[in-house]
Amino acid sequence: MLNNPDQYLSEQVKSIPPSAIRRFFDLANEMKGEVISLSIGEPDFVTPWSIREAGIYSLEQGDTHYSPNQGYLELREAINEYMTRRFSLSYDPKTEILVTVGGSEAIDLTVRALINPGDEVIIVEPCFVAYKATVVLARGVPVIISTSADDKFKLKAEDLEAAITDKTKLLMIGYPNNPTGATMSKDELASIAAVLERHPHVLILSDELYSELSYEKEPHCSIATFPALYDRTIIVNGFSKAYAMTGWRIGYACGPAGLVSAMTKIHQYCIMSSPTTAQYAAIEALRNADKEIQEMNAEYNRRRRVIIHGCRQAGLTCFEPFGAFYAFPGIQELGIDSETFCERFLKEKKVAIVPGKAFGSCGEGYVRISYAASMDNIKEAIVRLTAFVKDIKDEENHKK
Amino acid sequence: MPDRYELLRLIEHNARLTQPELAVMLGTTEEAIAAELESLHNDDIILGYTTVVNWDKTKRESVTALIEVKLTPQRNQGFDKIAQHLYRYSQVTSCYLMSGGFDLMLIIEDSTLREVAAFISNKVAPIEGVVSTATHFILKKYKSNGVVFEDKPVDKREAVIL
């Protein structure tokens, strides 16, 4: 056994803090199987059969070797067709698209390709936990902008302006958002774009993994559609959420050729290439699964309405999210912190939801409820949530 | 106004969804749901509500038979008169006019093997215009009315995923 392993570890690794919700994590893992899990940030749907079948067929055909480092050209062409068709953005499949091991790898590659020690990276919280950790690992300096329910967790132009310094290299945004479900319309992004146009040294990483899970009347708009920002933006997208392909580990990055080639350089040394089977399945997904995505979107949208209605009926304040598959209701009025709320809800009512503080300090006072779960489970969870909130309120009243 | 197609798909899959539940799921009012359902009933688009039952798990002895019936069409009436004659029997739960190698498909449910045999020989075959029949029995139902009959799937996902 290695004595005192910490002395050997890199400073970067040691500086990543342990999970803010370790206690809750451990308890939830112990109770797995006995509870209704609304704590899960991946679709409950299985990958549509036609996509799975394409992957299986490729294995039967013996397609088990490395793909090209950048990913199969056919897949990159399909990605470009998809981006053009869905979001009116086009990228050269030969030089401006990289196929990655999930959106997560694309985020990591972007940061590692760009960040020098001391470079500032603006991160908008509450957000996916990987952003800050990735920046710290690359010896960058995270600069946090906190958003709030009053603003529906949208990034405000004045907050961005105040956070930019001459050391700022990158802005990381993710809309539709995990954990809040917030979205930003074209007009709202325009005010952010205006700030960025005044600071041409800032690049943008736009995490659009949830772009197909948008329930607004207008379709999802990428910040890259603003002409002045197109050449400064890396879009990260993938298949995990839209096509329920989380376990396949397949995603992509689209952006200017100079940045994508740098990312490819890192990718080829670390990973060689993305999974071959997953790439064949992804081609099928992009070309022939529009109907399946629409059906999943419609089902998520129905569940979204039921969850928001249920949270509000239960007595929690909850802004209406129009993206992803999360509700982010506030629990401040109940007088207990988010981790205690979730632990007690788990133990007393056997429902798992995630404390908001897991996603940033401004997430304290909120809880993340995932509706990637069956309608029956959602309805039952709402019944238990209503009872639990009543219990907490009764306890508060007795104290007074 | 709720989307008619979405509403129909939802209640076709689960007829027990209440109007308040449907209103929330479709982002509309209970009044709009009630009005749309009434209109669907009046237009004979919704004709009834059923339950999907796995009879194999009950102790009842029954089979489901699919019967292909070849006909010669009747003067001035085509196949309609014979179809009507046949579907009036209560054990005929479905009756379809088909393209391909035969004309009518009948589905007989909740009968024993003997009862099906007797029905074919005594009631179907002797009808004027019936040329021949071919009877098939369902051995196992994998999926029916959109419902998979095998054991319920288990959630294999991890407990917490951020």
Image (cartoon, rainbow, N blue to C red):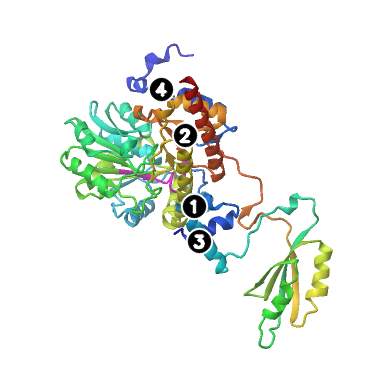
Instruction: Give whichever of B15, A137 is nearer the camera.
Output: B15
Q: Residue furthest top?
A: A3
Do circles 1 and 3 both sit on a common chain? yes
* Residue B86 drawn at (x, y percent): 73, 74
Q: Amino acid at mark 2?
A: Ile
Do circles 3 and 2 both sit on a common chain? yes
Q: Residue at position x 48%, y 22% from top?
A: A23
Mark seen at residue A18: 4
Q: Nearer the viewer, mark 1 or mark 2?
A: 1
| Chain under disc 4 | A
Residue A277 visible from this viewpoint: no
The answer to whether marks 3 and 2 mark residues whose Cβ atoms lie closer than 8 Å is no
- The residue that mark 1 highlights is B23
B81 w.r.t. A299: above or below? below
Residue A258 visible from this viewpoint: yes
Q: Nearer the viewer, mark 1 or mark 3?
A: 3
Q: What is the C-alpha distance between the residues marked 2 and 4?
A: 16 Å
Q: Residue at position x 32%, y 34% from top?
A: A148
- The residue that mark 3 highlights is B35
Q: Amino acid at mark 4?
A: Pro
* Residue A61 drawn at (x, y percent): 51, 52
Corner quadrant of residue B127:
bottom right
Does the magenta run of residues contain A70? Answer: no
Instruction: Give whichever of B27, A274 is nearer the camera.
Output: B27
- The residue that mark 2 highlights is B161
The answer to whether marks 1 and 2 mark residues whose Cβ atoms lie closer than 8 Å is no
| Chain under disc 2 | B
